[in-house]
Image: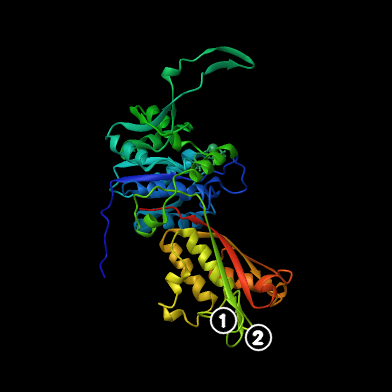
Amino acid sequence: MSVTLLPVPHTAIIVVAAGSGSRLDAGAPKAFVGIDSHSILRHALDGVFAASPAQVVVVAPAGYEGDAETELREAAGDRADLGRVVTGGASRQESVAAGLAALWGDVRTVLVHDAARALTPPATIDAVAAAVTSEVGVIPVLPVVDTLKKVDGDAVMGGVDRSELAAAQTPQAFPRALLAEAYAAARASGVEYTDDAALFTAAGHPVRHIEGAARSFKITTPADLERARHLLASSPARTAVSAAAGDGSAPRSHAPRVGIGTDVHAFGGDGDLWLAGLSWPGEPALSGHSDGDAVAHAIVDALLGAAGLGDIGEHFGTAHPEYAGAHAEVFLARTRELLAEAGFEIGNVSAQFQSNRPRFSGRRAEAEAVLSRALGGAPVSVTATTTDGLGFPGRGEGASVTAIAAIFPRGVQA
Ligand code: CTP
Ligand code: MG
């Protein structure tokens, strides 16, 4: 076994995530509100870990340190040793100060980043880090596009020259020693600054700007959260082929994918009926490779189809004798594993069983629980119908099942 030791980085990124999100008003601290299947914090950390290696300090709301740890570990992958979580304070400034206190001795450059700017491109993070010097801070900005007015009550007092203005974003990068001094001075004076650049400038140090990015907007209101959701959903789809190949250069997409699967088996198998993950003593068995569980098999095809990973025959067919007697749990757990390896997690599954028997409704909840557990907790619903005496299910010759599945790419990490 070989152990890879990462060199201790000279750059640290403090990700402030300790705010309550009063304007978003989503019933949880803003950082833990979901954009898609992942939280604001997780998206922010995916961006941070896609940038050059740095110490990463997540500043979490009191009581949410454990949740932040989980997000950090999942986003960090093999860089987990570079991350840690500290508890934030009552103001953003106090939260940054808590982050500064957790920096390693070797750190020379500090980036302070709002978790709320969840979709910030990694290139912006690298660009501010590259531009900072031992004396000069660097912030990303965007030009102001609106016409700005000075107002007094309801009166418009005059215009403001837009060309002199820029909208500040994060991450903001500073030489560590000077930023720490500036924070100590701010604490002593009791002044709250609007951002780190203002605090650094107040201590007498220069700050320069580079070009920011539209995607770095701060999620503040419900409309901002909608915007983030749309941006993620409209990213170009990450193909299953590149996902399966672990190609980190594949486009990041959080758009869901869907798949459909059908399975038909005739009655006439040996032993008991196996259906929807349950054994049905006294019911005629379905015939087929493995246990003939048409519900499980349709679900497997729906999931594999959604991920573009081939079909059940390819992964579980006669060329795989190890699955010959296997039941639903084995098939579904392996399918979930195949999807996870390709970078997908399961949204939900819905299956419909068509046959005269067995009577399904009395065991529906039990079946759904077994199937869901085998898929790692993803919701599974199973409906059943007879076909009014029509067709082979109506004549009692066999059963037909159709399933659909929705899946999501996981936060994609190179
Ligand atoms: N922040 C923090 N500690 C605080 C306040 C804010 O770490 N005491 C962080 C937020 O988590 C956010 C960033 O600073 O990532 C920018 O702040 P803002 O967007 O204002 O977030 P909130 O303060 O949470 O939102 P609101 O002002 O709507 O309550
Ligand atoms: Mg705030």
Residue 395 occupies quadrant: bottom right
Which quadrant: the N terminus? bottom left
Judged from the image, the secondary structure of the residue bearing numbered disc 2 is loop
**Is the CB–ligand 1 distance for label 2 below 8 Å?**
no
Kindly report the distance in space between the C-alpha atoms of the residues bearing marks 2 and 1: 15 Å
Picture coordinates of residue 413, whole percent (x, y)? 38, 53
Residue lying farthest right? 388
Judging by the rendered image, the residue that carries numbered circle 2 is: 281
- The answer to whether residue 141 is above or below residue 337 is above
Picture coordinates of residue 219, whole percent (x, y)? 52, 39
The amino acid type of the residue labelled 1 equals Ser
Picture coordinates of residue 148, whole percent (x, y)? 52, 18
User: Residue drawn at (32%, 50%), measured in percent from left and top?
Assistant: 104
User: Residue drawn at (67%, 84%), measured in percent from left and top?
Assistant: 283
Q: Closest to the observer: 60 or 211?
A: 211
User: Residue drawn at (61%, 71%), measured in percent from left and top?
Assistant: 400
**Is the CB–ligand 1 distance for label 1 below 8 Å?**
no
Residue 297 appears in view: yes
Q: Mark 2 or mark 1, which has the lower sequence index? A: 2
The amino acid type of the residue labelled 2 equals Pro
Judging by the rendered image, the residue that carries numbered circle 1 is: 287
- The answer to whether residue 362 is above or below residue 381 is below
Closer to the observer: label 2 or label 1? 1
